[in-house]
Each structure stands twice: as C-alpha cells, then as structure tokens.
Image (cartoon, rainbow, N blue to C red):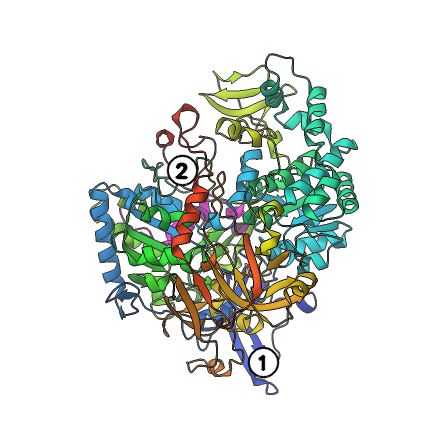
Amino acid sequence: MTLDRLSPGSGLQAFPPPEKWDDWREYDPKEWPRRVEKRYMLVPTICFNCEAACGLLAYVDKDAMRVRKFEGNPLHPASRGRNCAKGPATINQIHDPERILYPLRRHGGRGEGRWRRVSWDEVLEEIGGRIRAAFREGRRNEVMYHVGRPGHERTMDRILKAWGIDGHNSHTNVCSSSARLGYALWSGYDRPSPDHANARFILLLSSHLEAGHYFNPHAQRIVEGKLAGAKLAVMDPRLSNTASVADYWLPTYPGSEAAVLLAMANVILQEGRADLAYLERWTNWRHFMADRHPGEALDFGAFVAELKDHYREFTPEMAEAESGVPREKIVAVARLIGAARGAFASHVWRGSASGNLGGWQVSRALQLLTVLTASVGTPGGTAPHGWNKYKPVFWEEPPGQKQWNELLFPREWPLSHYEMSFLLPHFLKEGRGKLDVYFTRVYNPVWTNPDGLTWMEVLKDEALVGLHAALTPIWSETAAFADYVLPMGLAGERHDIQSQETQDGRWVSFRQPVLRAARERMGQSFRFTYEANPGEVWEEDEFWIELSWRIDPDGALGIRRWFESPYRPGEKLTVSDYYRWIFENAVPGLPEAAAAQGLAPLDYMRRQGAFLVARDVHGLQEAPVAVPAGAVKDPVTGLVTAAGKGIGVEIDGRVVAGWPTPSRRLELFSPTLKQWGWPEEALPGYIRSHVHRSALDPAKGEMVLIPTFRLPTLVHTRTGNAKYLNEISHRNPVWVHTQDARRLGLRTGDLVRVTTEIGYFVNRAWVTEAIAPGVVACSHHMGRWRLREEEGSRWAAARVSLEPAQGGGWLMRQRDGVGPFASADPDSLRVWWSDGGVHQNLTFAVHPDPVSGMHCWHQKVVVSRARSEDHYGDVFVDPQRSMEVYREWLGKTRPGPGPGGLRRPLWLDRPLRPAEEMFKA
Ligand code: SF4
C-alpha cells in the first residue's frame, strides 16, 4: 500500500495537493507504530480565533464524518498555509465537551442560572414577535445588536439597514477606535496596511510580530522584510518577544509615544530628510496656511518653515525626558526612518493608542512619519486599509436608516470613532433610553469591558434590558445574564466572508461549515446548517434570515423583501443564494478563475477557500476621475466638487481621486478638529496621558499598570475552551521591574495587591528587567470566572463567589481553581494545571477619551504586598466610585452639535451609516 504524497516542498512547506483533497489518505499518528490508514476529505474554512482570518483546512474523517484536525490552507493568500497555535486549536473548541449545543431559555430570575432547552422555532417566534411589536410601535432604537468579534463583511450592515434600525454596536471602543480616529482624520481611512515584506524600515508600536493585529500574516511578512534587510524597531514599555528580536527596542514610558514620534519627525524635518515634493503635492498645507495667515499669498516654503518651527520643541532631549528612551536612540531611529524614504512600514494597534488619554494623536504622529517619508501606499510603505481590504456588494442595498441612536452616538462625543459601546450600561442607568431586545454576539462585556459590575447590574434589570439574547458558541460571564443563550457555530461551523488588509494585495476568503460542505460534496442536502453541525448549533446567516421573515411574515413592514432570493423572486434567501450572488457578481476576476477550472464561482470558493483579488495595489490616489458637467474647481486648493461633494482634486492639470477627506488631500492640518472644538489639536500633537508622570504621586507609590498586552496563545475570552492553549498559558502574573521590586520588598511569586481607583485585585509578582521601571503589566486574557458550576469553561475558569464586602463594595473570591473534571473528553481528567490567572477588568473604571471615545485602558495603580486577609485572585470593586469616575471623564468632553447643527461631521463615516438627514441634530 502506498499513501498519498505531499505536494512539492519540504518540511512545513509541504501540503496535500488540492487535487487530492476529496480523498486524502494518511496514517493515523495515534495508532503508531501500527500503520492504520485514514481517509479524509479536506475542506477549507477560516480561523475565528482572532481578526486575521487565516485559512484553515478541516480534515474530515470520511468514515466517522467527524473533523479530526485543522491545519493551514496553503491556498489562502494571506496566511499561505501557516497558522499560529490558536488556528489548529479550533479542534479543541468544536470538540469541547462543555460547549452549548442547543438553544436555552432561562426560567427563574435573570442571572439565577436556571435554564431549559427550547426549539429554534420557539426562539424565533418570541424574539421575532417582540421585535415586530417594537417596530410597529415606533421603538426601533430599542433593538440593538452588539458584536464582539465581527466578520461577516457588510452582512450585518445589510440586515440592520433592512430592519431600519440604528442598532449596530461593537467592541471597537475598547479595542482600536483611538488609533482609527487618528488615521481617519489624516486620510478618511481608519486603519494602516503596512507592506512589511518590502519595507526598508519597520516600526511597530506594541508587539505585532507575536500577538498584534493580523498577527500571523503580518509576522510572516515582517520576518520576510527582515530577511531582505529591513531594520525593525519596536516601541513598547515591555520587552515582548517582538521587541526581543528587534534591531531597536524603545521602551517608552506609557503615553509618551507621540512625543518620541514627533521628535523623530523633528529630526527628519530639521535634517532635510523629509520628502518636501510629496508634502507639497499631497498634504493640505494650503488649508493650513489659509487658516493661519488669512488673506496672504500661499507659499509652500513658508509652510515648511512654519512646520519646522511648530515641531522644534520636540527635541530628542524633550522626548527622552518624557519617555525614558535615550536621545541617541531616538535620533538613530529617526535617521533610519528618513533613509527608508518611500518604504517605511508601521503599525500601531492597542498598546499606546488604546491605553492613553489622547491615544488618537499617537497614530496621527506615526502617520506624520509615513507622510514625511512619502511612504503612503507605496511598495514597502503603509497603505490605507481600504486599498487592501475587499468589501462585498449586494444585489440590492437597503437605504440608510432614518434613525439616530443616542445610546450609540451621544452628543458629548461628536467625533467618537465607532459607538460608545462600553458606556451602554452607564447611559441606561442615567435614563438615556432602554432596550427591548438586546443581542450580544461573541461578546462578553461583563468580563472584557471595564466596570463589569455595572454591566451585571444593568443586564439583570429587566426594566432597562427587556430581553437579552446571547449568540455564543460557549458559556461566558455575559451569557449567564441572558434570557436566551443561542449556540452559534465556531470557525468551521458557519458561512462568512472575510478579508483583511494584511499585505500589499487584496483577497477574499470564505468560511464555511465544513461538515455540511463535506456532506454536500458527497451528495447530501440540508435545509439548515444546524442539521449538519453538532447538536443544534446554528449559524448567524440563516438565523438572521429566518428571524427577519418572522419579524415581517407578510412583508407589510418592508423588511422581508430584503431577505428574498435574487434568483427566485419572492422565495426565501438561502446561504447558497447569498454567497453565490456575491462570488458570481462582486469579486473581480473570480468567475474567470473558476471557469478556468471548470467550476462555478461558489464551488471554486467552497474548494479553495480564498481568492486573491489584486496584487501590487499602489498609488490609487493618482487614479484619474471623470469630471461630470457642472463640477466646480476651487482655484486655490484644486478641490473639485460635484453637487456639493468632493470628487477629486486637480494636480498638474489632471483631476485625480486623492483621498476621501474634505480637501481630498492628506489632512496634516485638520479643519475638522478645529471646527469641532479641538483647535489646539489640529496638527499631529502630543497629549499628556492620564497616566503621565505628572499625574502620579510618587509619595503614594503610584505606578502605571499596562493591562492590555496579548499573549500569542490566547485571545480575550474566546480561547477559554481550547484545552491545548490553556495548557500552554494559564497564569498572568504582574510584571514588576527589579528596581520597583526592591523598593516594595517583592520577589517573584509573592502575592501583591494592585489597587486602582475603584478597587483592587490580588495576583502574584513576576520580577523582571523586561519592563520599564515604574511600570507594571498584566496580560488581559486570563482570570476567567464562573459564578455557577455549569456556566463557564472548566479548562480555564475559576469558580468564584461574588458577595457584598464589609464596608461596601463587592468582593469576588476564587473558591476553586482549575482542575481535573469528568467529561466526555478523557483529557479533562488529565488537567494538571490549577491556575486560571487573575481577573483585572472589573477593577477598572471607564475612561472614555473625550475625542475618540476610546476607553483609555492604562491605570494609575498602587502596588503593595498583599495583606493578611488577601487571597490569590481576589477582586474588590466599589461600583459607587465607578459612576463618579465616569462622570469625571464625561466632564472632559466638548459636546456637539457642531458646525451646521450637525451631530457629527458628514465626511467621517459610521459603521452603520444612517441617512444623511439624520446627521442633523
Ligand atoms: S493569527 Fe492565529 S488566531 Fe489569528 S486567524 Fe491566524 S491562525 Fe487564527
């Protein structure tokens, strides 16, 4: 007998050739040394354990019709067959004996832990009826969908617009909205897309190589760039694995990053290393000069002189004083960035931008370096994300909703980037509104967000939240406070389209339920995906289609029509219809590529799992624009408008696309910030963080806590039921510098109490020189907890009690750590680790940045030896104080409406953009 051979290549580059994916044979490693052959069907899908959307190949055992393992999909243009540890661990998640397999309805009080199994029909009938009543009674803003991990490119936008509600809420304001706002103000695009592979210099703020945004696809390309000679610098107070392989580690004091970046900009400007021709061509310097010198002739030379003057205060000495990074190193890195002209790749996510008050100015300052070196959208540079991310269109687009939901975009934050999601319970408590139907989807705010006790309080209050449906594959701290727990598919159990800006190119990938796809390849057919999935685990696409028909059974509400097939008018849309239409009509080049293999586009995607739409995407701002009759050109700025809207900019006698900003140029100077109440921040600047040294009292022993860093092996709470990953990583000690440890009398393993402004947590210390002095850090993935035995993952979560503490407040105390347990998986009796780490987010008050609305994660803390009454894992919170802190931060805002009586600038997008007239307050 001969087994199938791997395709050409060697070692980790070898994959089963696609022509053998229908019937791949290999020996079962568990049977070694016996040679037992296994026959598999290999079905591509997409990983769901972080946002990168790497390709996976499910190995479906053709005898048992069971998934045996997940490996990388070599045909995926971004991940190219490679995955991080979390990709293959998908197998743990789908075989987790504790996962939720059937829809559940609570009986008894909300949060009391009593559940009964119900049918999907019962679920649809109650929720559909309730939403229908709300719509008929004009209470559209009382229906809200709140997503943790998105995906489903544009699908939810289409659904919610079809429902006519302003009900999209996200997790982005605890994740990336500050960084996004900084980018959006520059170019209208809110994310960077670095071309690491072709860069000459790479600057990472935070640990992207090991755990950052688009982790695995970026990591591959950073390493490629390094192998080709690029230098790598990492700005991070923590010596992450990424920093440890960098050419330059810049351990900045938290919040000082913008000062260092602007000092680099100053060096580049003063030493004549900036690309002035690019600045003249593409920045809105004319607007700046007209604003500063009204009535005077516009002179680029004068602008450059003024720019140099403006940034002159950011000397390397000043940056060293702020950051603690030696001035020589700042200058050396600045010169290398200047020398990389045209090929400077960079990224900032979470870390500095999400930790600090004014974090949005960090990404603006970083983008200033990209602009000064003319590296915007060049080979080896940093492109706007929209150039490299594919977005589907549909056969029919519902119009923008005629609603504006103040629970999402309140007047205090007219420039907030994404919804003010983590303040939802605070707004509800203040009486700003209520919810009748609240969906949470792969979202665990009780655990993930700051001030989780306020979330618990509000979720328990049926007057504020009428019905809470948690769409989740597994139990979570939030699902415990739901009315319905609705099991939705994991990575290989549902349909979805994903695309991310991981590289110089644009791709689309297709997630599919692998057991359904395998059975369909064998000739079976299914009405719903839950018929092929484990238990009755469903998928969102089909759930939303069915729910929409229940909301509007006769079409009278005008909703049903959006959920009818584009191929069979009047009939219900199916998932095959939906993806078939997109792949046939909305992915350039795909129909031709499929035809070349004798396949329909949908079948091609079912077999390959991904498609490269474009490569070498550069210079799109120079694309010519057709100018319609009646268009008007501004003689000074070159801006070309039609029907009052900017369509391009004239440069050298040609009208080109430019950028989606009001000036169609890169807005170095932001008239938007000036007009909307922040004139002092109109240029990329440096805002002193809420944890700036001047805000700390050394006499009280105050330090800064970084609570945001990721481990490469875990993601937030989603990996809680992956046994392999929890075996690798199951504690999150507090990193303390040796100097601080000496001062505090601490050794590694000692219990410490970390006191925040609303409470404290008790953890163990890890004494190390891999953190800047005066700074402590604690990874945020761990410290999962369950109030009841059945409502949480025993691979990761400690059993806790939560009770009123003496003297006020609440004390959470671990009753049982992690340990062996009996289940259908024999490995559960082999759990050897006893720790699940320590939770910290409950002890954080909300810190909404007054401009971006981002929660500013870093904390001013006092670290001390634990007291005699303290136990490992204790968490104490004073919810009274948390509302006071919320109001203190509310006081920092500069509320709208803005110019023209608008709630928000028309040009700044929103995730679910309402009809234009709704922008008017
Ligand atoms: S980086 Fe890892 S977790 Fe993220 S999608 Fe890729 S394989 Fe999955």
Of the 4 image quadrants, the one containing the C terminus is top left
For badge 1, the amino acid type reads Pro
Q: Nearer the viewer, residue 562 or 427?
A: 427
**Does the segment drawn in magenta span residue 571?**
yes
Task: Judge depth for marks 1 and 2 and give the one in front.
Answer: 2
Residue at 24% x, 61% y is 121
Q: Over which residues does the magenta segment extend?
A: 568-595
Q: Residue furthest front?
A: 699
Q: 796 left or right of 233? A: left
Closer to us: 485 or 320 = 320
Residue 72 in view in this figure: no
Disc 2 residue: CB within 8 Å of ligand 1: no
Between marks 1 and 2, how big is the CA–CA gap? 52 Å
Circle 2 packing at 10 Å, graded few (<14), some (14-19), many (20+), is many
Q: Quadrant of ligand 1?
A: bottom right
**Residue 680, magenta (yes or no):** no
Q: Residue at x 51, y 25 (%)?
A: 647
Query: How far across and down, in percent of the image, does residue 435 sit?
Result: 29, 49
Q: Which residue is mark 1?
A: 29
Mainly helix, strand or loop, the magenta region? Answer: helix
Q: Is residue 537 visible?
A: yes
Residue 274, image quadrant: top right
Q: Which residue is the site of mark 2?
A: 913
